Amino acid sequence: QVQLVESGGGLVQAGGSLRLSCAASGSIFSIDTMGWYRQAPGKQRELVADITSGGSTNYADSVKGRFTISRDNTKNTMYLQMNSLKPEDTAVYYCKASRWINRLRYEYWGQGTQVTVSS
């Protein structure tokens, strides 16, 4: 199994910054893509950004130019630097890790961290 623990959420004013971390532990072999997702009240969970083991990144249009995803494979940790935060960024942010095992796709989720942006 893989355990994911997010940290770094909190309350920030619009225009401010936060840095989220996601630490992976356990049986973490062969993890390829890791990503950040968010879910606002009454809305579906959506992809914010993801990153492959090789460093290729993908962002939602709503965060391009403001958020930066990165990962440190030596520390088994992924980050999300969030700048120029907006009230609409308020959500619970979740970390996800994925891998293939015997042709089956496995996904693991963290417990989430709350980000609240005040106007």
Image (spheres, grey):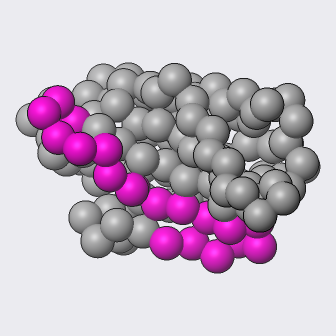
Q: Quadrant of residue 14?
A: top left
Front-most of 116 and 105?
105
Q: Report the residue at 41% width, 36% height from top.
A: 93
Left or right of 32: which side holds 13? left
Q: Report the residue at 47% width, 37% height from top.
A: 94
From the top left corner, tell me how far across and down residue 115 is, in percent.
Answer: 33, 30
In the rendered image, which quarter contains the C terminus?
top left
In the rendered image, which quarter contains the N terminus?
top right
How many numbered discs sit on the rendered protein? 0
From the top left corner, tell me how far across and down residue 60 is, in percent.
Answer: 34, 66
Left or right of 24: which side holds 42? left
- Residue 16 makes an appearance in the image: no
Q: Report the residue at 67% width, 48% height from top.
A: 106
Q: Is residue 45 located in the magenta-colored stretch of the structure? A: yes
Left or right of 110: which side holds 98? right
Residue 97, compared with residue 103, is above or below; it is: above
- Residue 99 makes an appearance in the image: yes
Residue at the left extreme, as displayed = 119
Residue 56, compared with residue 73, is above or below; it is: below
Left or right of 37: which side holds 100? right
Q: Report the residue at 84% width, 59% height from top.
A: 102
Q: Is residue 11 located in the magenta-colored stretch of the structure? A: no
Front-most of 79 and 58?
58
From the top left corner, tell me how far across and down residue 86 is, in percent.
Answer: 19, 47
Q: Magenta part of the protein: which range?
A: 40-58
